[in-house]
Image: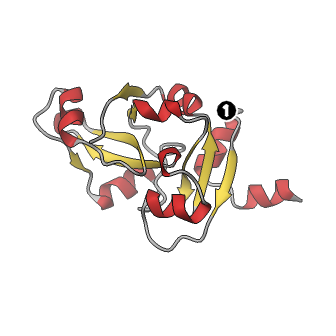
Amino acid sequence: SIQVKMRQMATRGIRFLEDRSIDFDVVEYVYKRKGALRAADAVGWDERAVVKSLVVDTGARGLYFVLVPAHRELSTKKLARVFGVKSVFMAQIRDAERLTGYVQGGISPFGSFTAFPVVMEETLLEQERIAINAGKRGVLVVLSPWDVQELLEADLEDIIT
C-alpha cells in the first residue's frame, strides 16, 4: 500500500512532520546535482515556491538554518545586519552534515540532529505551499509556509538580494 511505501522512505524530516500532525505531501525526483533550482525544475515547480535550506555560521551567535526561495540569493549583508554582526558565512559542509545528520543536497531543518534557530525569507509566506528538503537527496516535503514558520519558530526577515 502507499502508506507502507511512505514509511519505507520516511526520513527523519518526514517523521518529524508526522509526529506533529502537520499536513504535507512528499515529492520525489531523480537527484543528479545539488541545488534548489534543479529540484524545482525536476518536479516542475515554480522556483519561488522551492526553498533552499542553508546552514549559516554567524560567528559568536552560532549556526542557523536560513530558508530562502530557490531563485534568489541570500544577502549575507542583510543577514549580518539581522544578527548585528559584521559578517556571516556558509557553514563548513562537514560541520553542517555532522550537526544536522543530513548530507549536502538533502539538508532539512526538520528532524535535524541539532535544532538550530531559523531565519526565513519573509516573501516565502506569499506562496500557498512551499517545497523543502525532507532530509534525503531527491525527497521534498510540500507544506504551508505558515506551518514551516510556526513549527520552526522562524524569524521572518528580508534576507535576499
Counting labels gives 1
The spot of residue 124 in percent (x, y) is: 47, 35
Figure check: 61 above or below 139: above
- Which residue extends farthest left? 86
Figure check: 123 above or below 12: above
Figure check: 6 above or below 68: below
The residue at 29%/45% (across/down) is 74
Figure check: 82 above or below 107: above
The residue at 54%/54% (across/down) is 135
Residue 66 is drawn in which quadrant?
A: top left
Residue 18 is drawn in which quadrant?
A: top right
At label 1, the amino acid type is Arg
The residue at 48%/45% (across/down) is 48
Front residue (pair 101, 47)? 47
The quadrant in which the C terminus is found is top left
Left or right, 58 with reference to 114: left
The spot of residue 155 in percent (x, y) is: 39, 26
The answer to whether any part of residue 137 appears in the image is no
| Residue wearing tag 1 | 20
The quadrant in which the N terminus is found is bottom right
The residue at 43%/28% (across/down) is 154
Left or right, 94 with reference to 143: left
Q: How is the image coloured?
A: secondary structure
Front residue (pair 13, 147)? 147
The answer to whether any part of residue 54 appears in the image is yes
The spot of residue 101 in percent (x, y) is: 46, 55
Residue 86 is drawn in which quadrant?
A: top left
- Which residue extends farthest bottom? 32
Mark 1, Cα crowd under 10 Å, few <14 / some 14-19 / many 20+, is few
The spot of residue 108 in percent (x, y) is: 49, 49
Q: Secondary structure at mark 1?
A: loop
- Which residue extends farthest right? 1
